[in-house]
Amino acid sequence: MSGQGAGKRPEAPVALVTGASGGLGQALAVELDALGCRVAVHYRSSAARAEAVRGKLTHDAVVVGADVGSWEETRELYRHVEESLGPVDIVVNNGAVRKDALMAMQSPDDWHEVIRTNLLGTFHTSRVALPSMLRRRWGRIVNVVSPSGLIATAGQTAYSASKAGVIGMTRTLAAECGRRGVTVNALSPGFMITGMTQDLPERVMEDMARKAPVPRFVTVEEVARSVSLFLDQDCMTGQVVSIDSGVSVM
């Protein structure tokens, strides 16, 4: 992007958190609210859980439902947020699905759904918010990824490909937007007890925790606290910040 210089951080930024009805999404919404943000709480299938999250926030907030894998629904989501709270200053791309299977036995439909939601969804929400961020010369995009996007995990070719794709997009988009005051970074949480992992066998989870350099699960609150770093640092962009008990360095 041509031009240089960042604008001023808004006093009460508008933050869109996708997948905010889940465990990590809720923690991120609560943390952003504590940092003075007005939060758009996104959900895909559970309006009741999203409303419960909004009930925990102290600043103005709105609940928005959409399938971010759809460009049309994402544009409508953005229109709703803009009318309710104003232009989006911060996008936290947390919404994701995981459908694990060995590739030789996985259905193409499941593979496509993971890529559609996790990779295309991140593109859609970032794309719809970027023009306004660039005009105002301030913005933050935080893409929640995974150690699976950095290291090999058998049975997760779709999920790993989607998250590795988001990491590549993060770095390249950071190069495109930095001169206009918009930073783009990735947050890579370790294994947490959330809806995303509740279907894993307990022995598998315990084995994962035991092998990590810090041999325990990461809490959603620990991960969410790192979001303040992305908001405060004007010169940090294109980075992957891992809060994962050291799993990604094994």
Image (cartoon, grey):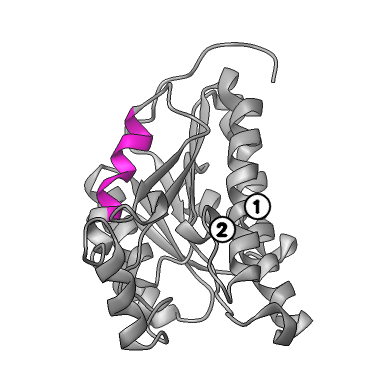
| Magenta-drawn stretch, dominant element (helix, strand or loop) | helix
Q: Quadrant of residue 106?
A: bottom right
Is residue 31 in view? Answer: yes
Residue at the (65%, 34%) spot, across then down:
172
Q: Please identify, in this view, whether the residue under mark 1 or under mark 2 is nearer the observer.
A: 1
Looking at the image, which is closer to me, 109 or 10?
Answer: 109
Q: Which mark is residue 165?
A: 1
Q: Quadrant of residue 46?
A: bottom left
Amino acid bearing label 2: His
Residue at the (31%, 87%) spot, across then down:
202
Looking at the image, which is closer to me, 189 or 89?
Answer: 189
Residue 187 in the image: state x and y as whole percent: 42, 48
Residue at the (41%, 84%) spot, across then down:
200
Residue at the (58%, 72%) spot, across then down:
156
Q: Which mark is residue 135?
A: none
Q: Which residues are magenta?
A: 223-232
Residue 186 in the image: state x and y as whole percent: 48, 45
Q: Is residue 146 left or right of residue 221?
A: right
Q: Is residue 41 magenta?
A: no
Looking at the image, which is closer to me, 163 or 80?
Answer: 163
Residue 112 in the image: state x and y as whole percent: 74, 73
Give neighbour class at mark 1: few <14, some 14-19, many 20+ (Cα, 10 Å): some
Tell which residue pokes out farthest to the right in this image: 108
Quadrant in the picture for the N terminus: top right
Secondary structure under badge 1? Answer: helix
* Vertical side of 38 occupied by 61: above or below: below
Is residue 54 in view? Answer: no
Amino acid bearing label 1: Gly
Secondary structure under badge 2? Answer: helix
Q: Which residue is mark 2?
A: 80
Looking at the image, which is closer to me, 17 or 166?
Answer: 166
